Amino acid sequence: MVYQASPTRYENMEYRRCGRSGLKLPAVSLGLWHNFGDNAHFENGRKLIRHAFDHGITHFDLANNYGPPPGSAEQHFGRILQEDLLPYRDELIISSKAGYTMWDGPYGDWGSKKYLVASLNQSLKRMGLEYVDIFYHHRPDPDTPLEETMAALDLIVRQGKALYVGLSNYPAERAKKAFEILQQLGTPCLIHQPKYSMFERWVEADLLDTLADNGVGSIAFSPLAGGVLTDRYLAGIPEDSRAASDSKFLTADQLTEEKLAKVRKLNEIAQARGQKLSQMALAWVLRGDRVTSVLIGASKTSQIDDAVGMVSHRHFSAEELAAIEGILV
């Protein structure tokens, strides 16, 4: 059966301007970091992507190394794009990144022009695209001159292989220097993608101010702290949870009783607001409008429904924010 997008897909999503650009992003974006590689069920991934688009999520975030194995998430997304979403390509924001290890040898990692240009060429081939909407440098390179990395991003835009460029995981001072170089080259930075949640707040020290001062948007990854800020761990660590597995992204020793006690208190505030904890955690990251979009992962359509449902109830009273801050400090 040929996929036809829901005619009501734009009714319940909020679209927010990204920095000082002309581009708007949905308040909720879908990341394909997990659950879309060769280790996942392809038809479930297809269902998740269709469901997301049917509910106004127009932004799909990938990277060269997403899988596992690396590259497989882009390959599967490319198939779904060609079979289902190709008529809607101009309604989509598709992003990819390079900066972590992708292939053997000295040219498959970090931030050289050689690596970034070759990686994006591979990503475009895997997805069957002529261009991506956003291409990120995935992490700072301590050895390659920043001028070379930014020149590579500028070149990629001039080649027509990306419409916009972004940075991920850059600290504020290095990001500011990168913004200045890109501005001089004539390819302003569109967006920064940092890790940010109630339990990961480093961006508040100076990065968010730096982004605002330079007209750069932001999209937060891991806004649910790897699943901690959900109802999954309210009663402890379930045997079938990520924390109980061999996942390197969330381990049982990270879930101290002190942290779990905070999770339970936060859940009480969420319940009083008429929300799930996950919804309140996403709304909190979006508070104050300094973050453009939150980047969620999903293995079930109900998780997408919860995230989209947050959009209509994402504002806080001063009392609620104070109560949350009292728990987090």
Image: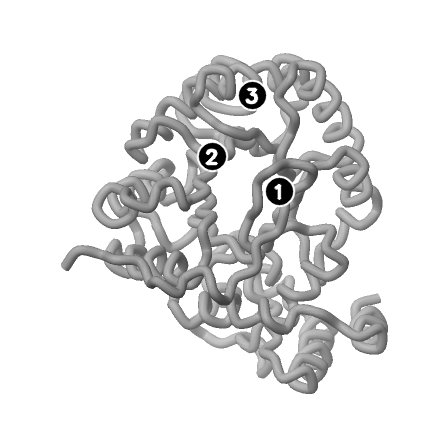
**Mark positioned earlier in the residue sequence (2 or 1):** 2
Using the image, tell me which numbered label, if any, was put on residue 193. 1
**Mark positioned earlier in the residue sequence (2 or 3):** 2
The residue lying at 45 percent from left, 22 percent from top is 108
Which quarter of the figure is the N terminus placed in?
Answer: bottom left
Residue 206 is left or right of residue 136, and the answer is right
Location of residue 251 by image quarter? bottom right
What amino acid is labelled 2 in the image?
Asp
Residue 174 is left or right of residue 314, and the answer is right
- Indicate whether 172 appears above or below 277: above
- Indicate whether 116 appears above or below 317: above
Can you identify the residue that label 2 sits on?
133
Q: Is residue 263 visible?
A: yes
User: Dots 2 and 1: beta carbons under 8 Å?
Assistant: no
Near mark 2 (Cα within 10 A), the count class, few <14, some 14-19 or many ≥20, is some
Can you identify the residue that label 3 sits on?
153
User: Dots 3 and 1: beta carbons under 8 Å?
Assistant: no
Foreground residue among 278 and 143:
278
Where does residue 131 sit, x and y in percent of width and height?
40, 28
Foreground residue among 86 and 108:
86
Using the image, tell me which numbered label, if any, was put on residue 158. none
Question: Could you tell me which secondary element the residue under label 3 belongs to?
Answer: helix
The residue lying at 21 percent from left, 46 percent from top is 83
What amino acid is labelled 1 in the image?
Gln
Question: Could you tell me which secondary element the residue under label 2 belongs to?
Answer: strand
- Indicate whether 308 appears above or below 95: below
Q: How many marks?
A: 3
